[in-house]
Image: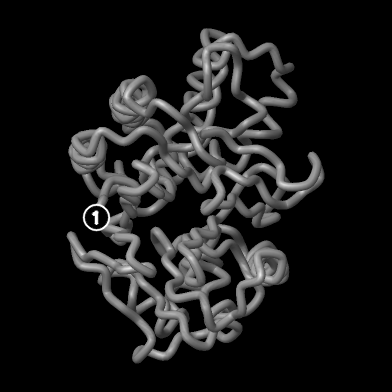
Amino acid sequence: MSAEPMNDYKSPYQKISPDITCIETNYQRVGLACCYLLQEGDSAALIDTGTPHTIPTIMALLQQRDLRPEQVQYVIPTHVHLDHAGGAGQLMQQLPEARLVVHPFGARHMIDPARLAAGATAVYGEEQFTRDFGVLEPIDPGRVIEAEDGLTLDLNGRQLHCLDTPGHARHHICIWDQQSRGFFTGDTFGIAYQELTTARGPFMLLPSTPVQFDPLAWHNTLARLMAFEPERMYLTHYCAVEHPAALVGSLHRAIDAYVEIAHACSATEPRLPLLRQRLRELYLEQLRQHGCVLPEKEIDRLLALDTELCAQGLDVWLSKTV
């Protein structure tokens, strides 16, 4: 099972299998973030939503697939960070029969997104927040399902199991699709930008985005996911990766490396620039070992946002633990 463009290389859609499509969200740059359409017969689910700018792309795909808006049964953000859930409110307005399925800790932020908007504005700045996310629309609480750990959703007979998966965020769920033997992992199984893939496979990067990085919980979550013996992971950043058993070790090592970097920088003031520098050095070293031959300038372009957010995440974690 591999992702292939539905039309050509300019297509915003990659067809992973007859029933799973990766959708480009056009967040920041092409190839940074995606969401997924999962179709089972005449019913469908959307996993992650992108931003409000993604909605026309999603609705066009539904039309291509001869799916009416009312045939979308579930909208499932893996967590409420805005590259994953920023478009949820507007999307739900377009899908009259859909229920929003979200972690209990995230549900209140989807129902009343004011605090979510304020927190994201503090991270990105008001100008970038407005450009990337616009206005966050509230969702009717009567249309929200709180995904307690172990919740099973029925998509036209196809079972989707929601797991509580902290580490990246306390409000994170992963969705196990037994039929494809894959997890929709949001950020829990890391990031694998396609530009950084080499003959050695995808380059796995760990996103310690503020504000809930939890190393121990993340180690435990990865172990729990692998107990299902998945054959593939559907990442939001970016698209599907195969043979996760061969990839998970690099994520465990990344968690430990982040902790080591954070502690090494803990006594420095200001701390954030040094964290940023140490993370950049780590990524460059790992990429060279992985066989990546891209110029440093291009690597910096691809990883600039992640380096900044990961540095902020480690800084917040240190402020809570040291």
30 horizontally vs 125: left or right: right
Q: Is residue 129 above or below residue 22?
A: below
Q: Quadrant of the C terminus?
A: top left
What residue lies at 27% left-to-right and 74% top-to-bottom? 146
Which of these two is toward me, 164 or 310? 164
Query: Residue 25: x and y, percent?
Result: 65, 57
Q: Amino acid at mark 1?
A: Leu
Q: Position of residue 107 (x, y in %)?
A: 33, 76
Nearer to the camera, 87 or 170: 87
Residue 90: which quarter of the image?
A: bottom right
Residue 176 appearing in the image: yes
Q: Residue at x 26, y 68 (%)?
A: 147
Residue at the spot x=38%, y=86% of the render? 143
Residue 144: name its quadrant.
Answer: bottom left
Task: Identify the residue position indicated by label 1 in the image.
Answer: 163
Q: Residue at x 54, y 36 (%)?
A: 307
User: Could you tell me how many numbered marks the image carries?
Assistant: 1
Q: Position of residue 282 (x, y in %)?
A: 48, 20
Q: Is residue 98 left or right of residue 167?
A: right
Binning the other alpha carbons within 10 Å of mark 1 as few (below 14), some (14 to 19) or many (20 upward) gives many
Looking at the image, residue 264 lies above or below residue 3: above
Task: Give residue 274's position: percent from left, percent from top.
Answer: 48, 29
Is residue 295 depicted above or below 241 in this figure?
Answer: above
Is residue 269 visible to us here?
A: no
Horizontal side of 168 relative to 104 (left or right) equals right
Secondary element at tag 1: strand
